[in-house]
Image: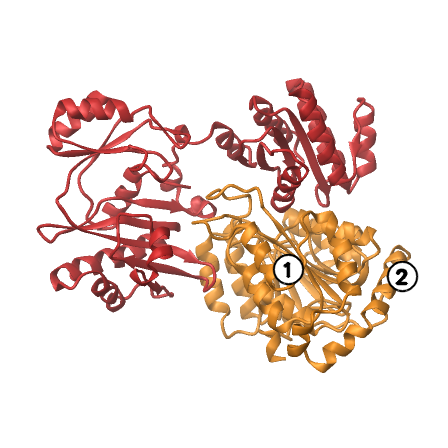
Amino acid sequence: MNLHEYQGKEIFRAAGIPVPKGEVAKTADEAVAIAGRLGYPAVVKAQVLIGGRGKAGGVKVVKTPEEMAREAGRILGMDIRGHTVHKVLITPSAEIAQEFYAGVVLDRKTETPLLMVSPAGGIDIEEVAHSTPEKILRLHLDSRGLPDYRAREAARFLDPRWEVQKQLARVLVRLARVYRDQDCSLAEINPLVVTKKGEVWALDAKVVIDDNALDRHPDLAELRDLGAEDPGEVEARERGLSYVRLDGTIGCVVNGAGLAMATMDLIQYHGGKPANFLDIGGSSNPDKVTAAMNILTRDSRVRAVLFNIFGGITRCDDVARGLLTALDRIGTKTPIVIRLTGTNEKEARDLLSARGMTALSDMDEAVRAVIARAAEAA
Amino acid sequence: MSILVGRGSKVLVQGITGRDGSFHAKQMKEYGTKVVAGVTPGKGGTDVGGIPVFDSVEEAMARTRADVSVIYVPAALAQDAIYEAVDAEVPLVVCITEGLPARDMVEVASYLKGRSTRLIGPNCPGLISPGQCKVGIMPGFIHAPGRIGLVSRSGTLTYEVVWQLTRAGMGQSTCIGIGGDPIVGTRFVDTLALFEADESTDAIVLIGEIGGTDEEDAAALIEKHVTKPVVAFIAGQTAPPGKRMGHAGAIVSGGAGTAQEKMARFERAGVPVAKVPSEIPGLIAAALRKKRPARLKLVSRAKATGSKKTTAVKARKAKAQAKTAKSKARPKAKARSTGKTRPKRAGRR
């Protein structure tokens, strides 16, 4: 789960990482009122769950209330790579002397968290890794977390001044602790700045929480911003489905994540464009199938839907029942192609043929069929 | 024969009284697996379908000397279940449970270092040596005994490929689902080493997906140390970056972990990459007919080169075997229960 900058900063603040004051506004008037309290120059920052805000014009420094009203008004409602801005963070502008990077991620190779710091802050760390890899220091964390002496090592890599190093080391230790204690997949400060007065501040916060750990962090689970996510993805999650919207025309409903990906790939291979990734999981609960059909048929780009079910523990006849129930409930006109193989395949075919529907048994054949149906429907 | 599990393997089921645990314990038993014990704290002394239930893994091990433990407990309890099995020195632990927090697996991975237990999973379908032993949730009937080894990060996609192999007359020695999480106990490289050393495996199918670099590591290992033919397939060519595709580990982040990169790496290693799953049986057949490129012979051992000559014969045998699989033809070779053999690198053989 991605958190907004302002939410990430709250977590940092609670962990003792210095974060500038700031408040969230939903209207230009609120933005002006907040800036009035915090003082000018101020920064207005779009709160969207996607990177590249700065480049898209979603971050502006303003000097007057008039400018704030104009810029906040412009940023609120703007579209940043498919995400509409509903909130802005208003924060005082800092006098930046240096910009660093600090982030903790999971390193799959070593199976440990990895702290990365770089004196080249303020830009995309992947860009730094690509063009100037020597500017990144990597420290693998073990069960001790980040011991102070290693934090000091990282701080020395960033700045030669002891007074600054002390502050940086403290931030890094706390960042590593946040990563661990809050079950993060990513805890990143970019930029981590030193002001002209020599003070260290976290000017941004990018925090991603491990979805699998949300059960033990009910406080974090509540931070989920449903308004900032794709409505289909929100509904899918509530129904226990795994759904990702893509931009093609062929919807797919599949059991299992690997098979779902392979199905998307096969659609593309045969010349079609998948509209989504959708894994209904091991269950064949009719409610799940109905929810899946609802999400797909509401998407106006979807011209045809492919069901690709490999019955193992999931029984084909259960999925067929779910599909028939779903069709009764929502009565879609979208063409549907069904592929069923495996456990109780015959029973499923009987159920479908009683309703005048047929199912294919070969995946390639089914994909070619659904592409043809989508072309007819176009 | 097979790897990791065979006819002699004795299996215990952690979480046997739960919905999934009891269902699959019975399914495994029905398949012919020796399910010797179950564990659910507080339910000791009862039984599930004739399988005795114990309060702890330690007790179950003392009574039954199981070789394998398979875990079906909820995600919040899975880390503890793994620890319990490791501390009871079960040689092979298979964690089916999906949804473990990554932090739990970071801790498990660190705890496993230097210990004798091998972990498979979590978030995996388990493993099966067809006709001998099934440990997990895969449908048994799609498999046939034979000489193809299969390893995959997925569940149903594995079934799809297994089914295509079986229909093409290519039975399997062992099929392993290593799991779709970012951190898993056993990786591609580990299973490749086991298949390379297994006399009952002639060729290997590897099914990878986006995310991480385990496929790249596998390609590097194959280049240097694997003499048997390998065919790969990678799922997720159409996956958008930054989006998690169902599996916790299936995500392209920062431009790394794409299907295209992985496919290119395998091709550089001389591993044929199937563009679609249905190409896999044909590529395996072709790879078994063809000799390995000369440069690989330079690093391969005499024994392995020798075995190449017999692969065509073996493939035909496998085909015959697969055809008669339904009339319960079983490989003659003695089953080996090997949770204990654990070559880390093929090169160290």
Q: Quadrant of residue A51?
A: top left
For image coordinates 34% across by 66% down, the residue present is A144
How far apart in space, not on screen, are marks 2 and 1 (Cα)?
32 Å
Instruction: Please give left or right for residue A95 compared with residue B146 in the image.
Output: left
Residue B234 spot, x, y in % from top left: 62, 51
Q: Nearer the viewer, residue B17 or A147?
A: A147
Name the amino acid type tagged 2.
Answer: Ala
Residue B33 visible: no
**What's the colour of chain A in the image?**
red
Q: Are marks 2 and 1 on the same chain?
A: yes
Residue furthest to the bottom in view is B302
Q: Residue at x 25, y 22 (%)?
A: A73
Q: x, y percentage for residue B304? A: 73, 77
Instruction: Point out the frontmost of discs 2 and 1.
Output: 2
Near mark 1 (Cα within 10 A), the count class, few <14, some 14-19 or many ≥20, is many
Q: Where residue A325 appears, x then y in whole percent?
A: 69, 24
Quadrant containing the N terminus of chain A in the rendered view: top left
Can residue A326 be seen in this snapshot? yes
Q: Chain of mark 2?
A: B
Circle 2: element type: helix
Q: Residue at x 24, y 66 (%)?
A: A148
The residue carrying mark 1 is B70
- Residue where numbered disc 2 is placed: B320
The chain displayed orange equals B
